[in-house]
Amino acid sequence: MYITNIQHLLDASAKMRKEMPKEARELIGFLSLIIDTTTKNLPLTLTQTDISCFEKGCSGIIKTAFRPDTEEIHWYCPDCENEGIIGGWQGTKWDNR
Ligand SMILES: [Zn+2]
């Protein structure tokens, strides 16, 4: 289970700039796609997106859901069973509400 406050990740990336490790940049790219897609529809149950899992060797397609009580985004890969929770996405450039 990955629990991410995207705000903290963005703060860290702003400080690191170019020295940011590739993995961290890829993770931000992956999470930003999830925020961008999920906030268009705010699905209340896990709903298939067109986002591929970021896990190496996994070709799963990510499902996401919006939790209205906490406003967190839950993502889940049915193939490798990776999943996570994203908070702090409100007001980012990927917030489509
Ligand atoms: Zn996967």
Image (spheres, grey):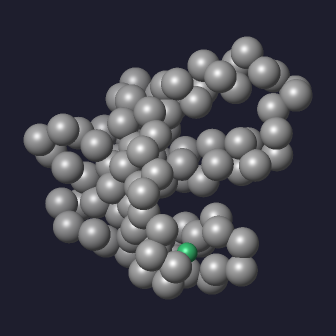
Measuring from the top left, give residue 82's x and y in whole percent: 48, 68
Residue located 54% across and 48% down the image: 31
Occupied quadrant, residue 48? bottom left
Residue with the most extreme top position: 15
Measuring from the top left, give residue 5's x and y in whole percent: 44, 33
The quadrant the N terminus occupies is bottom left
Residue located 23% across and 39% down the image: 71
The quadrant the C terminus occupies is top left
**Residue 40 visible at all:** no
Measuring from the top left, give residue 26's x and y in whole percent: 71, 50
Measuring from the top left, give residue 86's x and y in whole percent: 40, 43
Task: Depth check: give the residue in front, 49 or 77.
Answer: 77
Occupied quadrant, residue 53? bottom right
The answer to whether residue 79 is above or below residue 74 is below
Residue located 60% across and 53% down the image: 30
The answer to whether residue 22 is above or below residue 46 is above
Residue with the most extreme front position: 1
Q: In this view, does 62 lie to the left or right of 16?
A: left
The answer to whether residue 6 is above or below residue 33 is above
The answer to whether residue 68 is above or below residue 53 is above
Total number of numbered labels? 0
Task: Depth check: give the residue in front, 39 or 71.
Answer: 71
Q: In this view, does 44 lie to the left or right of 26?
A: left
Q: Within the displayed image, which quadrant is ligand 1 positioned in?
A: bottom right
Residue located 72% across and 72% down the image: 56
**Residue 77 visible at all:** yes
Occupied quadrant, residue 68? top left
